[in-house]
Amino acid sequence: MTTIEDHATDVDDRDPLFARIPRRDFMKAGAAVGAVGSLAGCTGLLSDDGQVSAADADASVPPGEHDDYYAFLSGGHSGEIRVYGIPSMRQLIRIPVFGRESARGYGYDDRSSQMLEDAGGYSWGDAHHPRVSQTDNDYDGRWAFVNDKANGRMARIDLKYFETDAIVDVPNQQGTHGACCMLPDTKYVFGVGEFRVPMPNDGRDLDDPDSYTSTIAAIDPETMDVEWEVLVDGNMDNGDGGKEGRWFFATGYNSENGVTESEMSSSETDWVKAFDVPAIEEAVEAGEYEEVGGVPLVDGTRDSSLNGGDRPIVRYIDVAKSPHGVSVTPDGQYAIASGKLDPTCAVIDIEALAETDDPNEAIVGRPSLGMGPLHTAYDGRGHAYTTLFIDSQVVKWDIEAAVEAEAESEDPVVEKIDVHYNPGHLIAAESYTADPQGDWLVALNKLSKDRFLNVGPMKPENDQLIYIGDDDAGMELVKDTPAYAEPHDASIVSADKIQPADIYDPEDYDEEFVDHGDSDIVREDGRVHVKMYSQRNKFGFQDVTVQEGDEVTFTVTNIETTPDLLHSLAIPEHDVNIKLAPQETREVTFTADEPGVYWMYCAFFCSALHLEMRSRLLVEPAE
Ligand code: CUK
Ligand code: CUA
């Protein structure tokens, strides 16, 4: 059985220079020159400029070894988050967010099912953009956030337990698409509304698309309350926050206010919207809003008086039509918006934006990159990496060269690599922080076509690992990874910045901890409350008798203190299934509506006597 010490050994304090070299290669190289454990031991892996070459940076992580990074990938309309280790690309765990999931008992116990109910009671969500909280522009390991495009929601995942702990149903928003943190310190999480609807959407203006609008929502990460929203012209798509606490950027298409594809793409230009957050806060403070759906809604449309003075709250920047991704460079200097239908990206100078009257003057670069640019990531060495959906490539380009070059020049392009096929997002290690690691990049390809064994008409997607750590040797495709539908975006975080717990702390939840000696059955007016512990290899009661029709609540604690020793409570024919990690307590309430004998059992294989870990629920027929 593993111990806490075992778990701690690989979150190590290796010299940062070594951190990117898989230990196996380090050992090999070290042994070769007889200097294991010293810097000299790995010089054989370093090229002249001190970078590790792709061939040496073996992406296989041997059995028993740990990865250097956690990657959090959204699961699209599966409604979940997947956690990979990078560079192995091993899937470590799945975190259910917007839908029930039986292996983790998510949506089965009273607490998690109440949370899903309070968040609208939907059975699914469309998770696109997982972003991890930051402090001082670096990952702090507290939370991950992800949007639900389907039902207009934002969820929070507690990274102590790798579980969803809050979901907010965002008012006045349909198609909450972009999700990202207001940096440097995650003051807000922004939900970016994609679908334009009547405001409020209560049956008015049904077929009057000109009156439809969309909003961004600023959500407090601690309380998950929506603090304020801003109404805009056109719709919005993706978003990213600046690094200095002032600007938030959102791309959008459909400045035409159309409702069909041809209407939405008829104009030659659309906007990147730059939200001046302190100016919006001032407007809220001054009461310059209308309360709609219980939140202050600030008018940020072009004709709004709040956009008339010398400090407009929203700046509308004209870019080629239907831009898609937007991301801010690690140094906070530029916001880069991808053209999608246009082969260029717009490089927006963030400082210039504050100084100029005409926001279009802030566009300081427009390199021509290839067909279908969608999303951009960074290596921290001045390069941008953009997915080309139509060309099925990732293009690496030089940001400063793009600022110096003429518009539509291809000169800033450094290199292109084929991916398989049709990439949406891509993500580089710590690309969303001020200090990307610059070694690994993952292209999230929408189609895999012929890359894997045929599994029928619905093929997996393909997450491809690319080594970007050697500018001389160029990008190298290292690994294909089949993915279930459907990752959109990801965040990659150094392993040492996340410190998950091994066991639960009962202080972190409200349910009553039921230890040995606390077992109890309380009966009152057709309600039965059973409190019992679970431990290798029994439950606190060998049998529990109730009456047909009773409403039964079980409060069950796993009193183990050994990490990785899970139990559960499963009750046949009553849809009862709760997971119990060490020191965790959960409650489940159900109606015992059929007389009979039901074997309550543990579904996690917990010991040699796991199968014997059973008790009886005896449901007596009603008189
Ligand atoms: S969107 Cu999916 S590929 Cu939701 Cu970030 Cu671009
Ligand atoms: Cu407890 Cu199996």
Image (spheres, grey):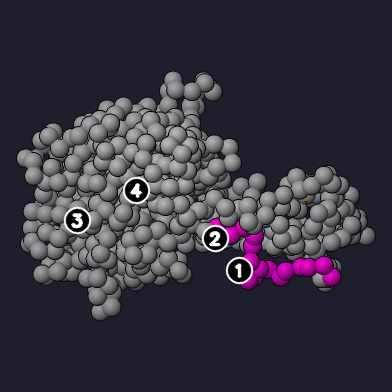
User: Is 185 colored magenta in this rendering?
Assistant: no
- For the residue pair 615 and 115, the one nearer the viewer reads as 615
| Nearer-N-terminus badge (3/4) | 3
Q: Are marks 2 and 3 in contact (CB under 8 Å)?
A: no
Q: Which mark is residue 160?
A: 2
For label 3, being within 8 Å of ligand 1 is answered no
For label 2, being within 8 Å of ligand 2 is answered no
Q: CA distance from mark 1 to mark 3?
A: 40 Å
- Which kind of residue does numbered mark 4 sit on? Gln
In the picture of the structure, the residue carrying the numbered disc 3 is 333
**Magenta residues?**
500-517
- For the residue pair 347 and 123, the one nearer the viewer reads as 347
- For the residue pair 270 and 33, the one nearer the viewer reads as 33
Q: Which mark is residue 508?
A: 1
In front: label 4 or label 1? 4
Predominant secondary structure, magenta span: loop
Position of the C terminus, as image quadrant, is bottom right
| Nearer-N-terminus badge (4/2) | 2
Residue 427 seen in this snapshot: no
Q: CA distance from mark 4 to mark 1?
A: 33 Å
User: Is 508 colored magenta in this rendering?
Assistant: yes
Q: CA distance from mark 2 to mark 3?
A: 33 Å
Residue found at x 34% / y 35%: 53
Residue found at x 27% / y 72%: 281
In the picture of the structure, the residue carrying the numbered disc 4 is 437
In front: label 1 or label 3? 3
